C-alpha cells in the first residue's frame, strides 16, 4: 500500500469517528434526565389550623397547565358534636354540612374542603384538580372553614398538596 493512500484512510477514520461522537453526544444530551424542560411537582403540607386567613400561595403563569392532587384529612373541631360537620374529611369536604353563622362565606363549596381562590373567584380544588389559567396571578389554597382568623385553632389534620405546573 502506498503511504499516501494510508494517510487518506487514517484521515477518513478521524472524520467518521468525530461525526459519530457528535451524533452520540446529541442523542445522550437529548435523553438526559436533567433536561431542564421536565417540570417537577412540588409537595406542600397545609395544616387545617391555618384556614383561609393564611392560604398557601402558588404563583401561576398564564397558559400553564396546573394539576393538584391532595391527600390527608382534616376536621373542624375534634371535640365537637355537630352532626354531619364535626367529622374527619378528605379534601373534597362535607357538602351536607352548613353552620348557619358561616353562610355565605363558605361560598357554596363543601365545608372543610381544599378550596382555591384566583382573581377573587372561589372554587373547589378537592382531591384532584386540573386547570389551565388564562392569566398570571396567585392561586390561594385554603381550607373552607370560616370560623374567623383566630378561631380555627380547634381545627386538626393536614392536607398534603402536590402541585405540578407544566
Ligand atoms: Ca373549626
Image (cartoon, helix red, strand yellow):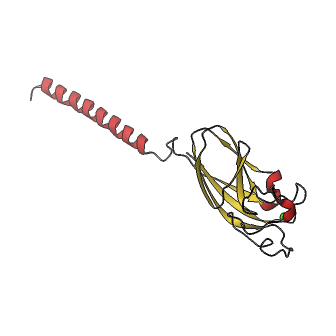
Give the answer, above or below, for where 48 lies relative to 10.
below
Which quarter of the figure is the C terminus placed in?
top right
Instruction: Give coordinates of residue 25: x percent, y percent.
Output: 38, 38
- Taking the image in four quarters, ligand 1 sits in the one at bottom right
Instruction: Give coordinates of residue 3: x percent, y percent.
Output: 13, 25
Q: Quadrant of residue 146?
A: bottom right
**Camera-side residue: 140 or 134?**
134
Numbered-mark total: 0
**Camera-side residue: 58 or 42?**
58
Give the answer, above or below, for where 28 lies relative to 103.
above
Q: Quadrant of residue 135?
A: top right
Give the answer, above or below, for where 35 lies relative to 86.
above
Q: Residue at x 71, y 55 (%)?
A: 115
Is residue 21 found left or right of 106 in the rendered image?
left
Q: Residue at x 57, y 39 (%)?
A: 63
Q: Residue at x 59, y 49 (%)?
A: 131
Instruction: Give coordinates of residue 142: x percent, y percent.
Output: 75, 54
Q: Residue furthest left?
A: 1
Which quarter of the figure is the N terminus placed in?
top left
Q: Residue furthest top?
A: 4
Is residue 138 found left or right of 63 in the rendered image?
right
**Camera-side residue: 38 or 102?**
102
Instruction: Give coordinates of residue 51: x percent, y percent.
Output: 80, 57
Q: Quadrant of residue 162?
A: bottom right
Is residue 2 found left or right of 137 in the rendered image?
left
**Camera-side residue: 105 or 1?**
105
Amino acid at each position: 500500500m502506498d503511504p499516501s493512500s494510508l494517510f487518506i484512510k487514517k484521515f477518513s477514520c478521524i472524520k467518521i469517528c468525530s461525526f459519530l461522537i457528535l451524533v452520540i453526544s446529541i442523542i445522550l444530551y437529548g435523553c438526559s434526565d436533567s433536561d431542564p424542560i421536565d417540570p417537577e411537582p412540588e409537595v406542600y403540607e397545609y395544616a387545617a389550623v391555618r384556614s383561609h386567613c393564611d392560604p398557601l400561595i402558588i404563583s401561576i403563569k398564564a397558559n400553564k397547565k396546573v394539576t393538584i392532587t391532595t391527600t390527608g384529612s382534616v376536621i373542624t373541631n375534634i371535640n365537637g358534636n355537630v352532626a354531619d360537620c364535626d367529622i374527619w374529611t378528605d379534601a373534597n369536604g362535607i357538602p351536607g354540612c352548613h353552620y348557619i353563622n358561616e353562610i355565605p362565606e363558605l361560598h357554596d363549596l363543601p365545608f372543610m374542603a381544599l378550596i382555591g381562590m384566583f382573581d377573587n373567584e372561589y372554587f373547589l380544588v378537592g382531591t384532584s384538580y386540573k386547570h389551565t389559567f388564562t392569566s398570571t396571578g396567585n392561586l390561594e389554597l385554603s381550607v373552607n372553614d370560616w370560623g374567623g382568623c383566630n378561631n380555627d385553632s380547634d381545627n386538626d389534620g393536614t392536607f398534603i398538596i402536590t402541585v405540578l405546573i407544566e
